[in-house]
Amino acid sequence: MAIFRAHARRRRNRLRLDGWIAGIGTSSGARVVVGHWERTPFGPFSDVMLERRDGHRLLLAPTAQTARFIAGTYTFDEVRVAPVGVDARGGAWTVTASSLRLSFTLGHRGAVGWLLRAVPGPLAARPAWAAAVALPARLLLGARTCGSAGRDRYEWYGAKDLHPVSTATVRYEGEDLGSLAPVEPPVRFGFGSTPRGPCLVRVTTTVAMGNEPALTCLAHP
């Protein structure tokens, strides 16, 4: 069941980011997570998180400001400030960031995507909704919709759409990382991983910082 806890604390700031998250695994064991954010307090930007086969966790962010925010919310072994470009044309995406090159194509929206689209956008973006659907998301997708990565920050992911990734090619520092594969093992940047199946998710992410009454959730399968 899902257990919700309200903590009586002084109010803290909440930041909201609206955009897309892609999670992709490779046959070499490397996993890539791309954030493509259309609306944020920092303006539009994209970032890349890469966990190599040896477990090394790398963040590529376009500015020092976005790098500080992301590295203050998640955990990395290395942070680089570098331009991150995303070219999204229909179902074909190309991502370039430092020495990483990623191309992927999307498959047709499945049942989960249609279910997510059926939820009104304003409702799906609310932290309370992310907490309420924590257990179904974990059972269906193997993903967490809310939790804390530490550093006195708490997050809620409000998913609004989902497309499977059907093909992908990833090169890092000139090396081909292999064919498309499940996101296994789960990435270790924060409190949870992306869905096991490679996919692109339309999402509103809310990040609470400091102390405030916060709705948190613990999902027990």
Image: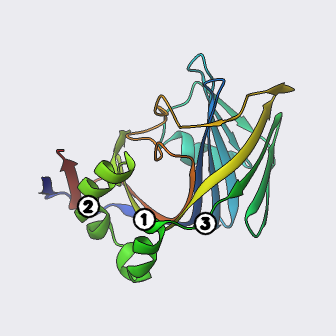
Q: Is residue 205 above or below residue 177?
A: below
Q: Amino acid at mark 2?
A: Ala
Which image quadrant for residue 43? bottom right
Q: Is residue 177 above or below residue 182?
A: above
Q: In the rendered image, which residue does mark 2 sit on?
A: 131
Position of residue 142 measured from the top left corner of the image (x, y, whole percent): 37, 45
Q: On the rendered structure, is 100 left or right of 140?
A: right
Of 101 and 163, which appears nearest the observer?
163
Q: In the rendered image, which residue does mark 1 sit on?
A: 112
Which image quadrant for residue 67? top right
Q: Nearer the viewer's eye, disc 2 or disc 3?
A: 3
Q: Amino acid at mark 1?
A: Val
Q: Residue at x 71, y 48 (%)?
A: 167
Residues at marks 2 and 1, CA–CA distance in whole angstroms: 18 Å
Q: Residues within 10 Å of mark 1 (few under 14, many from 20)?
A: some
Q: Is residue 50 above or below residue 118?
A: above
Q: How many marks?
A: 3
Q: Amino acid at mark 3?
A: His
Q: In the rendered image, which residue does mark 3 sit on?
A: 108
- Please, what secondary structure does the residue beneath circle 2 have? helix
Q: Residue at x 51, y 46 (%)?
A: 197
Whether residues under marks 2 and 3 lie with C-beta atoms below 8 angstroms apart, the answer is no
Position of residue 205 measured from the top left corner of the image (x, y, whole percent): 46, 61
